[in-house]
Image (cartoon, rainbow, N blue to C red):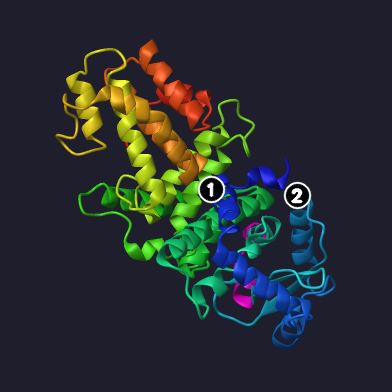
Amino acid sequence: MHADDLRYRNDKEQSDALLTERDVIKVNEAIEKREADGPTGLRRQLLSTSVRLSRKMAPDIHKLSDECVERLSMDIPLELYVFNSPQFNAMCFKPEEGKLYVMFSSSLLEGFTPKELQFVMGHEFGHHIYSHHDIPIGYLVKGKQRPDPRLALRLFAWSRNAEISADRAGAYCAQDLQSVASGLFKLASGLTGSVVNFDLDDFLLQVDDMQSFDEEPGQGAPQGDWFSTHPFSPLRVKALRLFFNSELMSKDAKAMNIDDLDIGVQRLMSLMEPSYLDAKTEAAIAMRHLLFAGSIVIAHASGEVSEKEIKSFEQFFEKGDFSDKLNVKRIEQELPQRIQRAVERSTVTQRMQVVRDLCVIAMAEGDVDANEREVLNNIADGLQVSRTFICQTLEQDCEPD
């Protein structure tokens, strides 16, 4: 499998969009101009402030690195360094003079098992192979001219999704969920395991508790979460468990397909983002408008609207929003325009969420008849979402997000 196949789609889509932003282009042009004058002195700084890990000094570490390089099909010379720090940390720098430089803290090298360390290595390599350095978020967010709030939110949301891609690269290198999870536990807690016995299921209960908070009125992702560059460690582990259970890592015939994997990850990541049902972004507004129109058209597809359909509709909207005075014909005529706006403003994974929620509306009475299915298929086609995803969703016991 090629490493590109592992990349989280939201990361790729958001990255491509951000690279066309004027502010991002401007900063990259400034960086390129500075680099054209010569090396920044990164290697000189690394050599003077840290210790280069030669193959003779650290053969076991290089063996782990070589395995990652082979699995990820990397083709660039590496230099590995260790620096003195009690903090578990690692970092990968944008290549200079044709070399990739990766640093590890001394405590991480001493406190992590080989498989845990291999996950961290693969994660750092993932940032390189997915060109995450092409979006200089540090310069953009901390520079003299700060980005407008909307761009800042997009940058932080992309950064969190980029971490998901890098985690997948690391997990693909390590090939062991338990080691990957325990490594993330150590990064989150600072513990090495001698005091606390790591338990994967107990660690993931933190995500369940976060979700229970978000189901309560007035709760949800605090604004501080929206400005975090990394997902919370329990979210990352839960996303990786989905990854290991997907067709990307499992040979089981019943393994989760990539569409379902991305929807599952998106639901987890939404714990750190405003829901599209509440958010005020252009994408969220377009998705809500589409959900409203699509729900109305589906509910009327087979004639009279039932109480169950109204109740299902009101799970997503306010009581009283569904009215027999609505101009259904006009809404039906406007549906293609709303679909197009959603395509222009949202990612494929976000549009899949809308399709999934429309399936919930369609299943309000249990069975989905031919007329309702036709509406769902037409909306999915317009949103560039596979009809297969509708089939899979209708076969599941769906609840609204």
Q: Is residue 180 visible?
A: no
Q: Is residue 9 above or below residue 104?
A: above
Q: Nearer the viewer, residue 349 or 190?
A: 349
Q: Secondary structure at mark 2?
A: helix
Q: Label 2 sits on what residue type?
A: Arg
Mark 1 is surrounded, within 10 Å at the Cα level, by few (under 14), some (14 to 19) or many (20 or more) other residues, namely many
> Residue 364 in the image: x percent, y percent?
28, 22
Quadrant into which the C terminus falls: top left
Q: Give the main secondary structure of the magenta stretch.
A: helix
Residue 364, compared with residue 23, is above or below; it is above
Task: Determine crowd level at label 2: few under 14, some 14-19, many 20+ residues with C-alpha closer than 10 A.
Answer: some
In the image, taking residue 101 as reference, residue 335 lies left or right, namely left
State which tag comes first along the sequence, 1 or 2.
1
Residue located at (49% from left, 43% from top): 344
Q: Residue at x 40, y 61 (%)?
A: 226
SS type, badge 1: helix
Seen as rendered, the residue at the extreme bottom is: 48
In this view, 187 is above or below 365? below
| Residue 371 picture quarter | top left
**Residue 240 at what x, y percent from top left?**
53, 48
Q: Which residue is mark 1?
A: 10
Magenta-drawn stretch contains 141? no
Tell me the residue that label 2 is attached to.
71
Q: Residue furthest left?
A: 320
Asked if labels 2 and 1 touch by Cβ distance under 8 angstroms, the answer is no
Q: Is residue 169 left or right of residue 271?
A: right
Residue range in magenta is 106-120
Give the image quarter of residue 82. Answer: bottom right
Nearer the camera: disc 1 or disc 2: 1
* Rendered location of residue 191, percent (x, y): 49, 69
The residue under label 1 is which amino acid type? Asn
